Image: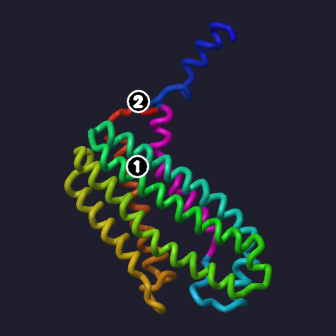
Amino acid sequence: MSASTAAVSRTSVYNTPAFWERLWRTGGVQSLLCFIIGYIIYGHQPQGGASSDALAAFYNGGRTQILISAIFYGFAVLNLMWFAAAIRSTLATAGQDGWGAAATVSSAAIGGIFLLLITIVAGLAYSIAGSGNQTLTSGLNDLVWAGVVLSSFPRAMLIMAAAFGLWRARLISNALFAAGVAAVVLVLMGGTTWLSDGFWTPYGVYSRLISPAVGVAWGLVVSWVLLTRGPATRDAW
């Protein structure tokens, strides 16, 4: 390698910490976009206790769409964990290492649960549903809905870590902090949606739409804060 080539390599924008810092601080937006695209492609999963015809129509008839959506969901999880790493490095720079560690742990838990759920639905669409074992298909379908409900707890922890950490670092106002606390409570309530019928079921409007929408809104707020108010963490990247 010539001296000029080496110089260009060293000064490339991709070699600068600022590039990676900004990239992962936008990881939340990237994750949300992938989740939304995946959700649209995925369609509406049959509710718990659905008939064999409904399960076959969804997992067999929508096999291609489900497998494509699994790719977008996978990228969503990937970007979510990088976003949590950006939150951690920002909070560590501000002296809030404990809250940063909480963001890391909670994002790992969310990623683990979501990857498990993605694996289950992809497996159902790929071959399990087509095997004719309706009992297994129905049980796994119900398990996915239960996983969505229980994911409320690590999701709330991630929101809490960001809200308290950024507030303690004086990067958000008291009003935004209060909004973050409200988001924690609303998402935690999603972990109680165990009724068998109506609004408060695992597949009801609250668990399926309202609770995730709260998380999406807070994710956008945190992304905005990191991009506009977050201190430089050049050494971290």
Left/right of residue 208 with respect to residue 126 in the rendered view: left
Q: Is residue 35 magenta?
A: yes
Pointer 1 residue:
223
Above or below residue 205? Residue 234 is above
**Which of the pair 196/19 is nearer the observer?**
196
x%, y% of residue 167? 24, 50
Label 2 vs 1, first from the N-terminus: 1
Seen at 20% across and 55% down, the residue is 174
As measured in the structure, the alpha-carbon distance from the residue carrying label 2 to the one carrying label 1 is: 18 Å
x%, y% of residue 173? 22, 51
For the N terminus, the image quarter is top right
x%, y% of residue 229? 31, 41
Circle 2 SS class:
helix
Residue situated furthest top in the rendering: 3
Main secondary-structure element of the magenta-colored stretch: helix
Above or below residue 206? Residue 28 is above
Left/right of residue 108 with respect to residue 132 in the rendered view: left
Q: Residues within 10 Å of mark 2 (few under 14, many from 20)?
A: some
Pointer 2 residue:
234
Seen at 32% across and 66% down, the residue is 184
Left/right of residue 107 with respect to residue 13 in the rendered view: left
Seen at 41% across and 63% down, the residue is 154
**Colouring style:** rainbow
Circle 1 SS class:
helix
Q: Amino acid at mark 1?
A: Ser
The boundaries of the magenta stretch are 19-43
